[in-house]
């Protein structure tokens, strides 16, 4: 692994730091680094759009986009450097993770010239906020099992069905929708991708209240929604390949996000120094110190895994499955760290108010962590990827692989 920037990377980092210093405020160290990919209020959405517009005007949005589409024509390593530097500043939630990290690469790879010219500028400027309409109540990890139907009717498609766990659907103006267009072929072969306006007649987004108190996810219902064929993304019945482009970019986007998210071992030290255990500061207890040391070493191991990704990208190579390894380990680590923090907090763990006090933030992190272990590919999916692509183990038996979808129960 190489822990140093190349000369070109060092210059890029210097330029990024200079622009951020002129346009944002540094964190003062008192704020916790929370997951910041979804807005909780309309004001946060407005602030995020304004920040995206400022970045676009300064040439810092769409870093990896081709120049012909308004980007910098940079590489993933430059995006990582930007994310690292931006994470040091007080900036709005990055609600454009789906728009810029997932939708844009999919459009660039599979969209028509008209779709690219109309949509990409709005993604870059922050005018368009997008969501990803993939998962369904009966098709989570088995994405190819979706049942939302797309029926051709002249120059339109009529969409009927339901999506779930759609992040940010309630404030998104647009979405990319995967639907079943053919039931007479195997499930992977009968899917088509669409661009959809979220205010179209027949679409209803219902926010899901989570145990953490947040309502970032949605159920989305489609009742005879008409979509023109010009808003089809990719070939008819060729949506699986388009979706794989989206999901591949999702893995990289999560791997090189603004931060790994959640609490850190250093914050556990601060917490343990401020609470008592058997009449003494908890940080003086050997078992507490050992547990924090374990968390710190695991966190450090994850950082080194991310460095492997960065090193591969810096050398122009494709990472293997480090993104899956990192996601698998991160979800479990976050949950265990938050659980330990609540144990240290004692009875205060049940009354802390987020985001106003530290205990409340730990409680939210604990209740959010299980969902993080599912979103972006569950633990089981990540283990399959690691087993099959890294360890060379035989794939799982898929008895329904070549059976027409209409014959599946």
Image: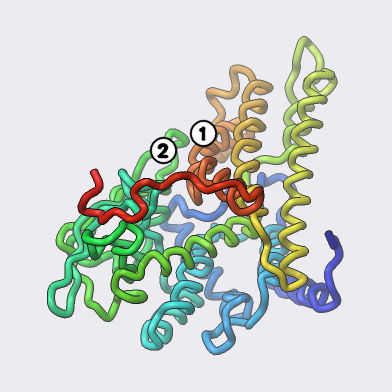
Question: Along the polypeptide, which appears first: circle 2 or circle 1?
Answer: 2
Between residues 405 and 199, which one lies in front from this camera angle? 405
Residue under label 2? 210
Q: Residue at x 33, y 68 (%)?
A: 193
Q: Position of residue 87 (x, y in %)?
A: 68, 58
In screen coordinates, is 169 left or right of 369? Answer: left
In screen coordinates, is 398 left or right of 93? Answer: left
Q: Residue at x 35, y 70 (%)?
A: 238
In screen coordinates, is 56 left or right of 110? Answer: right
What number is the disc on residue 132?
Answer: none
Q: Residue at x 45, y 79 (%)?
A: 120
What number is the disc on residue 367?
Answer: 1
Q: Quadrant of the C terminus?
A: top left
Q: Are marks 2 and 1 in contact (CB under 8 Å)?
A: yes
Give the answer, above or below, for where 280 lies relative to 366.
above
Q: Residue at x 29, y 53 (%)?
A: 403
| Residue 122 visible here | no
Secondary structure beneath dot 1 equals helix
Secondary structure beneath dot 2 equals loop
Give the answer, above or below, for where 146 lies relative to 281.
below
Quadrant position of residue 283:
top right
């Amino acid at each position: 692994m190489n822990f140093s920037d190349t000369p070109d990377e060092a210059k890029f980092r210097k330029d990024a730091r200079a622009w951020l210093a002129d346009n944002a405020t540094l964190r003062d160290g008192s704020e916790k680094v929370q997951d910041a990919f979804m807005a909780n209020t309309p004001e946060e959405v407005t602030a995020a759009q304004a920040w995206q517009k400022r970045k676009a005007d300064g040439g810092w949005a769409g870093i990896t986009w081709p120049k012909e589409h308004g980007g910098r024509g940079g590489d993933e390593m430059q995006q990582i450097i930007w994310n690292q530097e931006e994470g040091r500043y007080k900036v709005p939630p990055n609600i454009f993770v789906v728009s810029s990290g997932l939708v844009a690469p999919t459009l660039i790879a599979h969209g028509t010239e008209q779709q690219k010219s109309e949509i990409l500028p709005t993604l870059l400027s922050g005018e368009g906020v997008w969501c990803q309409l993939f998962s369904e109540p009966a098709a989570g990890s088995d994405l190819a099992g979706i049942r939302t139907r797309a029926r051709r009717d002249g120059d339109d498609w009529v969409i009927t069905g339901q999506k779930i766990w759609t992040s940010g659907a309630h404030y998104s103006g647009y979405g990319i929708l995967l639907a079943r267009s053919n039931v007479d072929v195997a499930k992977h072969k009968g899917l088509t991708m669409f661009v959809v306006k979220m205010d179209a007649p027949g679409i209803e987004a219902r926010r899901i209240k989570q145990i953490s108190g947040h309502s970032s996810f949605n159920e989305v219902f489609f009742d005879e929604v008409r979509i023109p064929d010009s808003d089809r993304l990719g070939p008819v019945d060729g949506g699986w390949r388009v979706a794989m482009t989206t999901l591949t970019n999702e893995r990289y986007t999560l791997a090189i996000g603004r931060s790994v998210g959640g609490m850190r071992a250093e914050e556990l030290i601060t917490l343990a120094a401020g609470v008592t255990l058997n009449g003494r500061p908890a940080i003086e207890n050997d078992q507490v110190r050992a547990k924090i040391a374990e968390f710190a070493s695991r966190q450090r191991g994850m950082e080194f895994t991310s460095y492997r990704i960065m090193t591969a990208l810096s050398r122009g190579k494709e990472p293997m499955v480090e993104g899956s390894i990192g996601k698998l380990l991160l979800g479990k680590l976050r949950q265990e760290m938050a659980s330990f923090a609540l144990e240290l907090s004692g009875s205060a763990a049940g009354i802390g108010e987020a985001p106003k006090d530290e205990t409340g933030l730990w409680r939210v992190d604990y209740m959010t962590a299980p969902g993080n272990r599912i979103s972006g590919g569950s633990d089981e999916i990540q283990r399959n990827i690691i087993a099959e692509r890294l360890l060379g183990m035989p794939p799982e038996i898929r008895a329904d692989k070549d059976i027409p979808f209409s014959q599946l129960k």
